[in-house]
Image (cartoon, grey):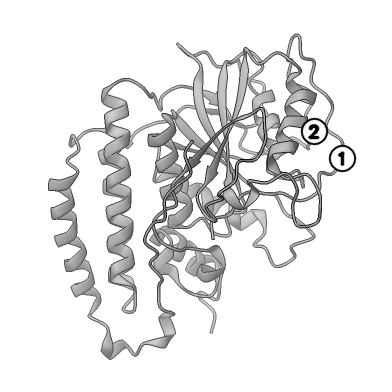
Amino acid sequence: LLSPGLCGAMVPRVPALAATSFSAPAPIAPALPNAELLTPTMPTAGLPTPLQTLTSPAQTSVAPTQEPPATDLAAGLERRFALLDEEFPLPAKSRAASVRYRIRDELLSTARAMLQADGSLLETVATESDRTLAVIQRRLDAKEIDPRLKLHVAWKTKRAAQNSRPIKVGVYPVAGDPLHWGHLIVALRAIGDLSLDKVVFVLAGDDPRKPTMTPVADRHPMGRKVLNLFAPFFAYSPIAIGTQYDGETNTFRLLALNPRLPVEAWYMVGDDHYRLKDKNGNPDTLPKLESNREKYLGGDSALHRLKVAFIERERPTEAVPTNLEVKFVKHAGFEASSSEVRAGNFALVPDTVRRYALEKGLYGQGQH
């Protein structure tokens, strides 16, 4: 299932930000590594409708002799790519096409390395990503989005970013243990459906309540490698390192990094959080965001505007009262979960994840 972000209890109180000047507060966490200004480079509501669900068989449940050789899987993918080129043509030197080529390289690498990879899943990833990139290309052609716009994504002291207009950004808090194709295609879809300039992934810090979660020292570099495949549309933020803040808090910490930069932020979370209270009776995403908006932004939303994008999952049928603008983003089109990857199904992730796991001995890779 798609990771909706951190929704645990908030820990030490974050200093309130002055609503008049919106000056960046003193860091709420220790100085973070790799502080940077995001400057992308090349090589780069109605409720949602049900989508077809594809499930991947366990990799160990089918004997290798029953699966086509990896070369056949790769050849089948390349035939599928040729058909997709006709169905979703992209300018050869466009940013969307660059991302498509990187996605295809990852899928082919999986097909060649894994004799038991689910070929239908790989073809579905290729189809859904191409379909979404074609929408993004139309946005680019119409000059509705601009992934080159700048945004501060980490604590730093460099000069403030300046853009020609307010930047429209998705804020996607996830554990990323690891990032999988479901996360990535949904984020691409948000760019196309919501006309976003980019999506910033806020990877969670270490959490003592989750002792089995892969430590930041491996999880964040691995996630950053994956997100680089989608440059300039995706960006990585380290602001959760050293904290246990939930996604509803980290969104405002991200806005606080841009005190003079107009930002339209879309908080991205699974629609299982489209409710007022969680299963323990505590405020869920919408009331938490409303409370935090009042605390950090006050009544002035001219500079920083907050909206919510719920990712289709449970398809709620009743509206939840809120004064925030809400929209729904369609599911990736197949089932994926990080726990499946950790159990060994690496067809669900870019092959960069499998190679990193093999190098570092993560998720049972490289262990005998």
What is the quadrant of the N terminus in the image?
A: bottom right
Q: Nearer the viewer, mark 1 or mark 2?
A: 1
Label 2 crowd bin: few (<14), some (14–19), many (20+), radius 10 Å: some
Q: Position of residue 23 (x, y in %)?
A: 74, 15
In this image, 187 relative to 5: left or right?
A: left
Looking at the image, is mark 1 or mark 2 earlier in the sequence?
1
Amino acid type at image mark 1: Pro
Q: Which residue is mark 1?
A: 12
Position of 319 relative to 221 (above/below) = above
In this image, 120 relative to 225: left or right?
A: left
Q: Which residue is mark 2?
A: 28
**Quadrant housing residue 61:** bottom left
**Quadrant housing residue 295:** top right
Residue 180 is at least partly visible in this image: yes
Q: Position of residue 312 (x, y in %)?
A: 50, 50
Of residue 273 and residue 3, the one placed in the foreground of this image is 273
**Do residues under tags 1 and 2 come within 8 Å of each other at their CB atoms?**
yes
Residue at x 52% of width, y 52% of height: 315
Q: Number of numbered discs present?
A: 2
Residue 104 is at least partly visible in this image: no
Disc 1 to disc 2, C-alpha distance: 9 Å
